[in-house]
Image: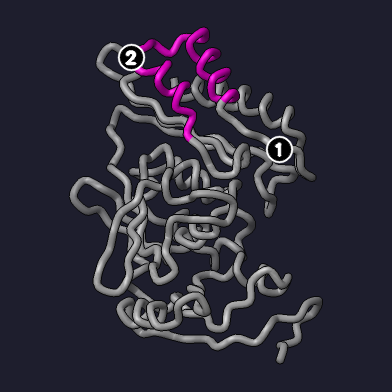
Amino acid sequence: MFLKTEDHMLPEFDLLTPKTLPEALEMLAEGASDVTPLAGGTGLLVDMRGGLRRPRALVDLSGLGELRAIHRENGHVVAGAGVTIAELLEHPLIADKAPVLQQGAAVFANPLVRNRATLGGNLAYASPAADTAPPLLVLDAEVELVRRGESRRVPLEDFITGVRQTACCQDELLAAIRWPVPSPRAAGVFRKLALRKADAIAVISVAVMVERDDDGRCAQARIALGAVAPTPIRARAAEDLLRGQPLTPETIAEAARLAAGATCCIDDVRASAAYRQRVADALVRRLLAEVA
């Protein structure tokens, strides 16, 4: 049986509506491979209409207050996986302690999608072009995965393992994302290049975070890129080069070259691999100069 939509057919499924997080985890444990979590649905439902996914049941997480909070805890900022992109834009703690993530949220799709799409859903969908992934990578974020009776934390860099692939087990749920409160000496910035200003998938995205020491040298640097490899990546060689160095134009240029060299780009309908690599060099150079 199918449900009629305007252009496509949405396959029939059972909609499960847990009242609490433990109840949701119980449903996931009992359903095994036939049950899929549903947050905002901005990616999953599109895949279902296109025939790419056919789950027997969806577990609706939108009513779980446990997944919707943003707070500070033991020197970290913790955002529930059910926090919407629009809520990231409006929350004062994100504006104060993670403006680089707020910048990523500001260019996420359009206002209608931002009101539905969730932070956890954007990461769990595991697109190489996920707008929130590079900002969270430079914030050194980790994700909290929960299942019935236990939980574990995984660095975000290890969580997204491939295109539409994550380290989350079938009966696990991405419950929260956490990152250390950045030093007052740290500055971060994010840029996304797309074919149009709104509602577009990134051709390439870059985030940088630099912490300076008392002498103005780079004490710590993180550089992350999206849409340039099967997963969002850190440019480790570029980060190592910057550490302990003054942010001179020459040092910045070499770091940008190394960051571009870390990419593994492809040709697709949005851009060629060669173009993405050139833009990676230019954007990293521009953003490092900006935080310097």
* Magenta residues (range): 234-261
Q: Residue sitting at 35 percent across and 61 percent down?
A: 145
Q: Amino acid at mark 2?
A: Gly
Q: Is residue 59 above or below residue 96?
A: below
Q: Residue 14, which numbered label?
A: none
Q: Which residue is mark 1?
A: 266
Name which quarter of the figure residue 75 lies in.
top left
Q: Is residue 259 visible?
A: yes
* Residue 249 among those drawn in magenta: yes
* Front residue (pair 190, 153): 153
The image shows residue 233 at horizontal and vertical percentages of: 51, 37
Alpha carbon of mark 2 to alpha carbon of mark 1: how far? 33 Å
The image shows residue 122 at horizontal and vertical percentages of: 52, 57
The image shows residue 219 at horizontal and vertical percentages of: 31, 20
Q: Give the quadrant of the C terminus.
A: top left
Q: Amino acid at mark 1?
A: Ile
Choose the circle earlier in sequence order: 2 or 1: 2
Q: Which residue is mark 2?
A: 244
Left or right: 70, with 56 as reference point: left
